């Protein structure tokens, strides 16, 4: 086991958070179309919330779409940070096993880690799939001789959050501080020490995103009014037909005399 050098972790984050998070987030927003945001979100919800203006509707669905994409992109970036930390300490590596993100050996144990963003990452079906992946990995390693006499332990690792019920029936679930301490060889403060380097260039990149977001909001609002409003009033039937109808074409707008 090697000693973790915080300066190297900070350097890794600062060198990779631009292309690994900010650039990808901005690129996803650039590629969004009005069709994307209208078809991904529930129009019934916003009707129930008495949304009346095109601007309010587009702001809500664009925010929700961008936020969902942001969570995914940042989760993938944090996974890379976790692999780097473990690689530095335990010579950890990206796993080739299905559904497993990280594996490493320590003493007489092979650890296989599935890295998730937070503790509420999936539904019951997703969690059942995780257990299936663990079982499959165990069978594969046991029959291939890859364990080389080691025992095997499975970890559900969540980059943030708390779950004090960490002993599961088939594995351990380590969240937040517990995960970062585990993969760093015992650094109890690593989970807080990551905060500063993660903020590298955040202000300038967020300013860039705000300009892009404002442009998308204006363009989408104008297009939405043209396609889904009659005399300035949202035509909810037309909108629901576009979002959920089995025949994709938009109902033509009736011009008012």
Image (cartoon, rainbow, N blue to C red):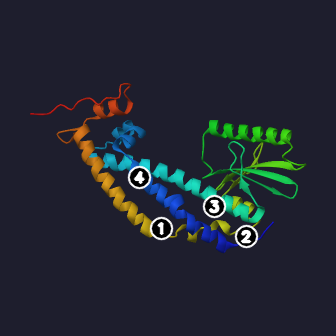
- Quick one: SS at disc 2? loop
**Residue found at x 22% / y 40%:** 233
Which circle's residue, 1 or 3, is located before the other in the chain? 3
Q: How far apart are the alpha carbons under marks 3 and 2?
A: 13 Å
- Quick one: SS at disc 3? helix
Q: How far apart are the alpha carbons under marks 1 and 3?
A: 17 Å
The tag on residue 29 is 4
Which circle's residue, 4 or 2, is located before the other in the chain? 2
> Looking at this rendering, what residue extends furthest in the left direction?
257
- Quick one: SS at disc 4? helix
Q: In which quadrant of the rendered image does the N terminus lie?
A: bottom right
Q: Residues within 10 Å of mark 4 (few under 14, many from 20)?
A: some
x and y percent of residue 112 in the render? 75, 50
* Residue that label 2 marks: 4
Q: Taking 254 as reference, is 191 above or below it? A: below
Q: How far apart are the alpha carbons under marks 4 and 3?
A: 24 Å
- Quick one: SS at disc 1? helix
Asked if the residue at tag 2 contacts the one at tag 3, i.e. Cβ–Cβ closer than 8 Å, the answer is: no
* Residue that label 1 marks: 202
Which circle's residue, 4 or 3, is located before the other in the chain? 4
Q: How far apart are the alpha carbons under marks 2 and 1?
A: 25 Å
Asked if the residue at tag 3 contacts the one at tag 4, i.e. Cβ–Cβ closer than 8 Å, the answer is: no
Q: How far apart are the alpha carbons under marks 1 and 4?
A: 17 Å
Asked if the residue at tag 3 contacts the one at tag 1, i.e. Cβ–Cβ closer than 8 Å, the answer is: no
Q: How far apart are the alpha carbons under marks 4 and 2?
A: 36 Å
The tag on residue 81 is 3
Between 23 and 170, the one nearer to me in the picture: 23
């Amino acid at each position: 086991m090697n000693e973790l050098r915080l300066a190297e972790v900070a350097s890794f984050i600062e060198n990779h958070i631009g292309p690994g998070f900010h650039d990808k987030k901005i690129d996803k927003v650039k590629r969004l179309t009005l069709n994307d945001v209208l078809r991904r979100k529930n129009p019934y919800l916003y009707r129930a919330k008495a949304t009346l203006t095109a601007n309010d509707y587009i702001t809500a669905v664009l925010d929700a779409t961008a936020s969902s994409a942001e969570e995914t992109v940042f989760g993938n970036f944090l996974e890379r940070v976790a692999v780097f930390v473990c690689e530095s300490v335990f010579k950890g590596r990206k796993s080739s096993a299905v559904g497993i993100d990280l594996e490493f050996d320590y003493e007489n144990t092979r650890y296989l880690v599935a890295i998730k963003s937070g503790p509420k990452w999936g539904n019951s079906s997703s969690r059942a799939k995780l257990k299936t992946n663990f079982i499959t990995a165990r069978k594969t390693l046991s029959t291939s001789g890859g364990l080389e006499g080691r025992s095997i332990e499975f970890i559900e690792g969540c980059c943030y959050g708390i779950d004090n019920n960490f002993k599961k029936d088939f594995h351990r679930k380590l969240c937040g501080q517990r995960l970062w301490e585990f993969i760093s060889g015992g650094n109890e403060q690593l989970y807080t020490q990551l905060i500063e380097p993660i903020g590298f260039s955040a202000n300038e990149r967020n300013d860039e995103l705000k300009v892009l977001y404002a442009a998308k909001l204006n363009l989408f609002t104008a297009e939405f009014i043209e396609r889904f409003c009659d005399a300035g009033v949202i035509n909810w039937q037309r909108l629901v037909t576009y979002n959920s109808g089995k025949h994709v074409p938009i109902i033509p707008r009736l011009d008012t005399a």
